[in-house]
Amino acid sequence: RPFLSGPKQGELRCFKDTMYHKEKSIQIKNSASALYNNLSVLRIAPRRLTYFTVVHANVVNTVSASWDGLNYSHRQLQSKEPNVATSTSLIMQAAFCVLPSRDLLVVSSQKGIQMYESDGSIMVYWHALDTPEAPTAQAVFARGISAVSDNYICVGVSSGAVLVFDIPSKGSNITLSEVLEEHKEAITDIASECSGSQECLANLVTADDGGNMCVWKSGEEFQLLNKIPGLDITCSSVKLWKGTVLAGYGTGQIRLYEAVTGILHAEVNAHARWIYSLDIAPFSGLLLSAAEDSFVRVWHVSMTPETNSVEIAHLHNECVTDTQICGAKFCDGDGYAFAVTGYDLSEIIRYIQS
Amino acid sequence: MSFFVIDRTRHGLISDSHVMNDIITTMFNKKFLEELFKPQELYSKKALRTVFDRLAHASIMRLNQASMDKLYDLMTMAFKYQVLLCPRPKDILLVSFNHMDAIKDFVKDTPSILSQVDETYQQLIEMYTPLSNGEFQLIRQTLLIFFQDMHIRVSIFLKDKVQNSNGRFVLPISGPVPRGTQVPGLIRIFSCAGEELTRLQFKNGGNYSSALREGSFELFGDRVTKLGTNMYSVSRPVETHMSGASKSSAQHTKVNAAPNPLAKEELNLLARLMGGLEVQKPGSTDNGFRVNLFATDEEEEEALISRPDELSYGVINIQATKDQQTNAELAKIMGEFTESGDQSPSASSKGDDLLAMMDGL
């Protein structure tokens, strides 16, 4: 299949306007809620399936789609404590976490964090947040989910804390290993190094409501390597690729920083409204950005290690008419296909390279 | 709702100017506002509709179920529009200030209500201006959950082309960008030393212009945004359409229809809110006058019968009377929300508390 490899700027530009076209949408049981990063995708090549998950209020919609387009199977999960029949709370995010030995579906809500087997069939772990008796002015919730290294899953909290969970290769003996307390504002998103390279010093970035970012190295004790201060503008979505932090902001800007030094490589006036989602295709360096302005944009990020330079070029636009987009993810590591969700939309829209 | 009442008053359909004053007096009742300003969970649709009903009936204005439904639909769709279209999350505060400015104008000749409105202004400013953009976005996202899947078509929006025939709002990809945002199109690449190396332009696919000036977050000032201002200022008929709503996405969430396990808390909250809302005792129904949102009585009746099930709000009838029957009704509602098998004493005492509070009204 067509494959964008070995980036030469001229080669890529000629694909611009017809680079992707719309494919058949997947219907979901509920409409998507307006939440950051409200789409997660898990590709299961051996079974020729892709899982998608979208949050609606206090429900997680998961759909498993076969690659031949013939079979769709749906499941809904609610955010509730085990053994308490009726408590539910609003869900902030649901995301697949891929570890060498297992894949988990992590759901973060106002009450706590749930971890399920990736098909949503069994809940393997529940962690309750310290919620006050009566509602307080300060909202309490968990948001920001990422697997990191071989055995950790990190989840952010509204207080600014980042919870680090130690995940065994199988079973439910998951434990809270550490609590990272560097952020003072609510965590928005967390990302781990996804290039597959073992050489990167930093392998985790955490972002908050004020746009501040912390760069970490995972381990028995996580090490803080760098802090990149924000400008009081929310960083709603963040990615880490080949040592570069890619961040999307409430002002519609995308910025690329060198993770360990905080050097600003590039700044893009990318969107006219709040960015809700960024994703990177690690094999090709394609970047996907989506915002409330109804646009999904595809970019190409290239690095020249000799000069330590990072560049970003614009490739393609898709406008989802009258829709505030809340989730956008590539469906594969090359960026051959991507999927999009929008507030009030009961479908997952898909695009594929022409 | 206030804008609607004023519009109808001007058209001579509501002949009593006290209606406006009564509604506003009730809405700005100190006890009611105290409850409103407390940190709390998002209301269920049922709860909000109940509060709205009580507010609407705080004056001698009386509406039938169908007209009430229509007024409520109008209000919720207008509010959804305002929250959705806010260019920046903190603009929802500017929208609230537009609402407040208009209310102040309505009651400028009544000093007692005016001082209450001013005090509320101060509370809004104190509570909300310190919030960060991220916190406002969280508020906005939570409000958008409430409005999710509502696609009732409103004539005034259809005519102005801000709503499509499928009930979804038009989101323009043109016009000024929000304050703090740049028009999309520029890529800047920097050297490690921080110098700009390259500038590239890309086509943004829209037709944007630079941001307008900042709106005022003070007690007085130009809010700049038109969201939240009187949508009836240009005179035209207002209708809502039900048929379109049932045709559009049939995937209405069933989540809200299931008994809300937090309803006990909610009923308590409602009771406290109602405690602050004094109901006009019409004495005899002759004193109240009916407002019909439809062209004829027959149309109104027809609208009620043909309203799709998923759009009936199932209003909780909480009346401030010492009626035996009403108390029994309330106790029954409380009983419905208690989990089956939960015979703990606390369940019944919460019900008793609620009834005692209602009795005290």
Image: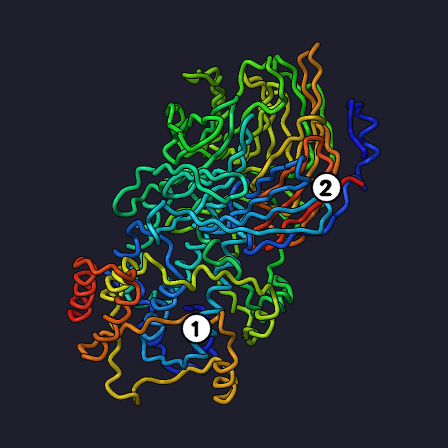
Residue on which the image places disc 1: B6
Q: Is residue A104 above or below residue B257?
A: above
Report helix, strand or loop for mark 2.
Answer: strand
Residue on which the image places disc 2: A317
- Left or right of A82 on screen, residue A168: right
Query: In terms of depth relative to the viewer, which is nearer, A346 or A167?
Result: A167
Residue B236 in which image quadrant: bottom right
Q: Is residue B269 above or below residue A314?
A: below
Q: Residues within 10 Å of mark 1 (few under 14, many from 20)?
A: many
Residue B211 seen in this snapshot: no
Distance CA(mark 1)–CA(mark 2): 45 Å
- Left or right of A189 on screen, residue A342: right
Q: Is residue B245 above or below residue A343?
A: below
Quadrant of the frame with the N terminus of chain A: top right
Give amino acid for label 2. Answer: Asn
Q: Residues within 10 Å of mark 2 (few under 14, many from 20)?
A: many
User: Residue A40 location, x and y as percent?
Assistant: 57, 40
User: Residue B105 location, x and y as percent?
Assistant: 39, 64
Report helix, strand or loop for mark 1.
Answer: helix
Which residue sits furthest top? A306
Query: In terms of depth relative to the viewer, which is nearer, B209 or A90?
Result: A90
Q: Residue at x 48, y 69 (%)?
A: B73
Query: In terms of depth relative to the viewer, which is nearer, B306 or B125?
Result: B306
Residue B26 in which image quadrant: bottom left
Query: In terms of depth relative to the viewer, which is nearer, B263 or A244?
Result: B263
Residue A85 seen in this snapshot: yes
Quadrant of the frame with the C terminus of chain A: top right
User: Residue A328 location, x and y as percent?
Assistant: 62, 41
Q: Is residue A94 above or below residue A27?
A: above
- Left or right of A310 on screen, residue B140: left
Q: Which mark is residue B31?
A: none
